[in-house]
């Protein structure tokens, strides 16, 4: 009598994990040409199957409307011809990136003649849990494939049919290039219990990448038995030092807050040196208010700009992802650094200053994944870093910090070449 | 009325974590000279307080003997003048290593003029849980300090008094150099519940490094809310390819198994090509048996060497850490690689071969942290890699794989230098 796993969903998830593990072994040794061919064939399949994909998306959209989803969420969920074409273009971009696998990261010789090389290898099986944005299905699958990893994807349940149609197209490309079909798999159900199983499959999954709201990420971090590469919120700061160029201060602050308010690199708190507040802040706040931004400020800020409302302690902690900005005056550089290190989510923070020594100190002492001098926090993006594409911005300190692109989706191993060396007994 | 934490131990652990977090902020910015001065002063303090340390160790040893600990465990626990001197020497060695913090790992310019640098920074607060080996207290504390991290140490309860005396000496060195005393802390109780609190202090601890037996590491991986850099067992293989030089095969196999049987890099299974078994294996097994090793083999092995007993499936999975070796014949290179990838703990594996193509394929296809060609698996050691010292050999795939030295105890951040760049709206 064979042992039967109690839960059919668990059985299904284990089978998915085993298939991913087997696929990862093949992908790890796949040459660049095969991986790129798979990505380009998948791009073609996305074009060819655009009709099917848009039909599936229409089904998701109808259900989402019936459920009363917000306009912003519906916009994220919706696919159009143009968006499908953009996904296909994204696959081609990833195909054009250098293959990270096999790169020699370091190589040195030991006095006993041993030749030691550190070489990039894939991570293995990557589980990605994300919100209802169908395009992430293609982006994440492509990045994992390029880095030689098998991907297990889990999009938001509202995008289930869209994601399934996209994965079918990706799989077609993968198979056409002779790679294992299980290279990119979608969890085949919208049942939330499936995520619980995924988080416990430490034998079959090497890392979980959660993307989304705080509650999702906290659930994943609390439950997961698999290592997590977390993408937490971006409570980002822009600090106007007294030495800031006034025009640059306006341009950077307005762009950092308002270019897109819904991205993790958007500035949420503006700090300004008290001694320069009068001079620097007024045109900045005018620019922001003109752009439709609400200002929440301390007493000094409200005196300078009476349209500002009062900020509370909670505002220093808030990622608005909206046209709202908390504004605070600080006593100077040290005070600014202390505020940022206390309230930042360690994602992205910026100083605007002409004083090079002040900038150098801010860059050194602010403990965030990305620290900028005289540039908008909205540059916190793998594409803007030159990574070609990214899966998100990691806010943890282990493995990868900041934008996670193909290189960050790899591990390494050591190759040690000898000529018969044995280790002395000592 | 102030809120009172229910559990006094939990309160104590949180205070420890807060102190570590504060110390880490200071250490992250400490110049190399201060860290090295602290390590050298700690080495002096170890010498000066050798008497106190040996007294504390005598107390631990007496209790361990009364509890009936094995000879091997007593040997690990025991300190002598010579061992205290070796610990002090270890601190001086770490002081002499380059400071990893601040190293520019990469730097590039973007078309828009942004200058992006990836720079090493400390991990933050490192929790290390280890067996009853007092010398690890000094080694681990020193490596963390050099990398700018605060350390929270938890040695085996049998070594509690020894570790406390060692940490007192380290703290003296740290304070003498003007660094925060909480840079190196020992959990102030042998109560096992303290470990449970440590594993849940995700706000105050950035990574847990467990060292020890399988049950400890599995408990840590199951319970921890803090990311874990695991050091699992070393089920290491040496594979004799048909092209192996017979003399080299004997030298490497005997050294890999018997130089020290209790280390994680010791070979536990020997594989040999069936076609060459008769020729290659006999002298190897003679050398091993002469050295006191028991052989467990398959039918072919037992025919060649009648003193071998029968191996079972379980033997292919076993890390003996003893003078016992499992020996198996394989059909050839492919079969050997498949066996290693199926049974290895992905720690360290070796091929002995003169055929360069066979060696290249083994190096490429074996999925382990360290893969060797014509060298003993006992080279799996940070010191032998030139890292100066190590905290252990990581067997996971995230962050660090293989020997964990000062560089592996760091993270990085991005410094982005601009001249007023803002991101286009698109």
Image: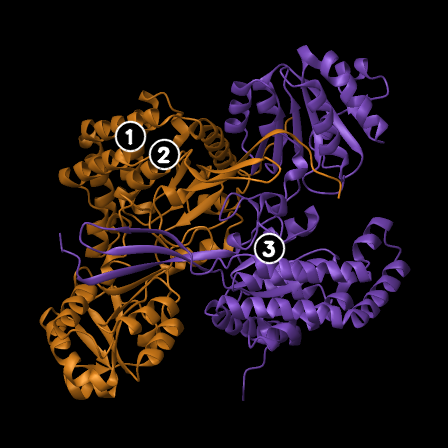
Chain colours: A orange, B purple
Local packing at callout 3 (Cα closer than 10 Å; few below 14, some 14-19, many 20+) is many
Q: Which residue is mark 3?
A: B209
Question: Which element carries disc 3, helix, strand or loop?
Answer: strand
Q: CA distance from mark 3 to mark 2?
A: 30 Å
Q: Is residue B389 above or below residue B319?
A: below
Q: Which residue is mark 2?
A: A145
Question: Whole-percent x and y of residue A390?
Answer: 31, 46
Find residue A39 and name its label.
Answer: 1
Q: Quadrant of residue B262?
A: top right
Label 3 resides on the chain identified as B
Local packing at callout 1 (Cα closer than 10 Å; few below 14, some 14-19, many 20+) is many
Please state if B3 lies on the left or on the right of A302 as rendered.
right
Q: Is residue B189 among what the camera can see?
A: no
Question: Which element carries disc 1, helix, strand or loop?
Answer: helix
Q: Is residue B31 above or below residue B212?
A: below
Question: Whole-percent x and y of residue B377?
Answer: 66, 35
Question: Which element carries disc 2, helix, strand or loop?
Answer: helix
Point 26% across, 84% down: residue: A298
* CB-based contact (under 8 Å), mark 2 and mark 1: yes
């Amino acid at each position: 009598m064979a042992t039967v796993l109690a839960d059919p969903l668990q059985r299904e998830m284990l089978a998915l994990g085993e298939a991913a593990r087997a696929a990862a072994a093949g992908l790890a040794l796949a040459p660049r040409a095969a991986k790129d061919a798979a990505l380009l064939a998948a791009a073609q399949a996305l074009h060819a199957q655009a009709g099917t994909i848009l039909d599936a998306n229409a089904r998701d959209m109808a259900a989402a409307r019936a459920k009363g989803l917000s306009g912003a969420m519906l916009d994220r969920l919706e696919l159009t011809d143009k968006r499908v074409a953009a996904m296909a273009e994204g696959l081609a971009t990833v195909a054009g990136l250098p293959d990270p696998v096999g790169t020699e990261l370091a190589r040195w010789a030991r006095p006993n003649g041993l030749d030691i090389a550190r070489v990039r290898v894939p991570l293995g099986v990557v589980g990605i849990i994300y919100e209802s944005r169908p395009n992430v299905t293609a982006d994440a699958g492509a990045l994992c494939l390029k880095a030689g990893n098998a991907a297990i994807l889990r999009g938001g349940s509202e995008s289930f049919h869209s994601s399934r149609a996209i994965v079918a197209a990706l799989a077609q490309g993968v198979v056409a290039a002779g790679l294992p079909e299980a290279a990119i798999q979608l969890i085949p159900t919208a049942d939330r219990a499936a995520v619980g199983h995924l988080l416990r499959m430490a034998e079959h999954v090497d890392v979980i990448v959660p993307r989304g709201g705080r509650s999702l990420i906290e659930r994943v971090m609390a439950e997961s038995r698999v290592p997590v590469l977390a993408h937490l919120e971006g409570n980002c700061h822009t600090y106007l030092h007294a030495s800031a160029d006034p025009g640059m201060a306006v341009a950077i602050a307005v762009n950092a807050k308002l270019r897109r308010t819904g991205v993790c690199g958007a500035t949420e708190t503006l700090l300004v040196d008290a001694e320069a507040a009068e001079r620097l802040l007024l045109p900045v706040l005018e620019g922001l208010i003109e752009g439709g931004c609400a200002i929440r400020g301390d007493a000094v800020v409200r005196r300078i700009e009476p349209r500002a409302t009062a900020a509370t302690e909670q505002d220093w902690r808030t990622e608005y992802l909206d046209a709202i900005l908390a504004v605070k005056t600080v006593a100077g550089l040290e005070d600014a650094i202390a505020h940022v290190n206390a309230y930042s989510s360690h994602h992205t923070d910026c100083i605007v200053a002409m004083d090079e020594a002040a900038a150098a100190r801010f860059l050194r002492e602010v403990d965030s994944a990305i620290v900028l001098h005289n540039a908008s926090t909205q540059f916190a993006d793998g594409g803007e870093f030159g990574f070609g594409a990214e899966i998100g911005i990691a806010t943890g300190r282990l493995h990868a910090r900041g934008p996670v692109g193909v290189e960050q989706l790899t591990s390494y191993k050591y190759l040690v070449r000898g000529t018969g060396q044995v280790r002395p007994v000592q």
